[in-house]
Image: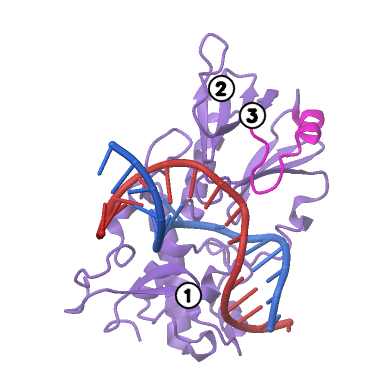
Chain colours: A purple, B red, C blue
Amino acid sequence: MPELPEVETVLNGLKNNISNNSKVKEIIIRFPKLRWDIPEKELQRNIINQEILDITRRGKYLLFKFKTGTMLIHLGMSGVLKLLQLENGKITEPAKHDHVDIILDNGAFLRLNDPRRFGCVLWTSENVSNHKLLNSLGPEPLTSDFNFEYLKNKLKHKNIGIKKFIMDSKNVVGAGNIYAQESLFLSKIHPEKLAKDLTDIEIKALVKNIKRILEKAIKAGGTTLKDYKNSEGKPGYFQQELLVYGRANQNCYNCEGIIKEIKISGRTTSYCDICQK
DNA sequence: AGTATCTCCTGCGTGC
DNA sequence: TGCACGCAGGAGATAC
C-alpha cells in the first residue's frame, strides 16, 4: 500500500516515539512466510536485548540499525507497522494478519500487519547499503541527487513509457502508482510517452513535480485509500488532493476534458489526454 | 544489455 | 445470499 510518503510518515512516527536507547525485549513471529521467510533465529540472536541505534529509510525500506547489523522492513502493498502501548506489561490481543510483534523495553511494541504478505522483514549483518535489495536502487527523489542532469542522462535511449520508467526503483525510488500518475499530470506528460522522447522542459517539470507531490503528500501524512494507517494508527489526508488517480471519467481539474483510464503493465493509470501530451 | 510479463497473497466491491 | 471475477499504495524473478 504504502508509497514513499506513507513510509516516511511511518518512519517519522517511529522516530518521534522510540527514544535513542530503546532496547528490544522480545520478538514474536506468528507467521514467518511473508514475501521471504522471516529469519527468526538471526533476528533473535541479533536484536534481543539490543538497542535500536537508528531508524532510517531507503526507498520504501525501513532500516532499523542495531550493533551487529540492520533489520529491513518493507510494507509491500498492504503492510501496516504500528507502534502500540503495552497494557499492564502485556501485548494486546493480536488480530488477523498481525504477523510480527517487536516488544521494546519502554512500554511500547511494534506490530506488523500485512494481509497480502508482499512485505518482508529481513536481517543483514553487512553494510546495509550493499544489500542486494538496496544496492541498485536509484536516488532518493527528495535529495539533490535526483535532478535534471541525472534524469536527462538516465532517460536517454530508453524505449519505455515514462510512467513505467519513473515507477522503476532503479531509476528513482518512491514514485509508486499514485504519485507517478499525479506527477505526470502536473508535468503535462502522457504516461505512455517514451522516456527518450521527453523534452528538457518536460524533464525539468517532472523532476520538480515528483519532488513537489511527494513533499506535499508527506506533509499531509500520506494518502489513505483503503487501509493505510501511520504508526499511530492515523490515516493520511493526501487523497483529498489527488488530481487524476482514481478519477477516471470525471472532469479534469485543469481543462474541459474527461480523465481517461488505461492499463500500463497491469496497473490502472489515469490521465487527461488533453493536458498530457 | 533492455524490456515485458509473471508472481507472490487476501480482501473487497461488483454484477449476475 | 452466494459465487465468480477483477482489482488493489510493490517490486523481485523470470523470460524473452
Q: Residue at x 44, y 72 (%)?
A: A208
Apparent side of residue A37 relative to residue A155 in the rendered image (left or right): right
Label 3 or label 2, whichever lies nearer to me, is 3
- The residue tagged 1 is A163
- The residue tagged 3 is A30
Residue closest to the far top:
A88
First in sequence, mark 2 or 1: give its number.
2
Q: Are marks 2 and 1 on the same chain?
A: yes
* Real-space Cα separation, disc 3 to disc 2, in angstroms: 18 Å
Q: Foreground: A216 or B5? A: B5
* Real-space Cα separation, disc 2 to disc 1, in angstroms: 40 Å
Please state the extent of the stretch shown in magenta in the rendering.
A31-47
Image: A172 above or below A18: below
Name the residue type under label 3: Arg
- The residue tagged 2 is A108
Screen quadrant of the C terminus of chain A: bottom left
* Real-space Cα separation, disc 1 to disc 3, in angstroms: 38 Å
Whole-percent x, y for residue A117 in the image = 58, 45
Q: Residue at x 57, y 30 (%)?
A: A110
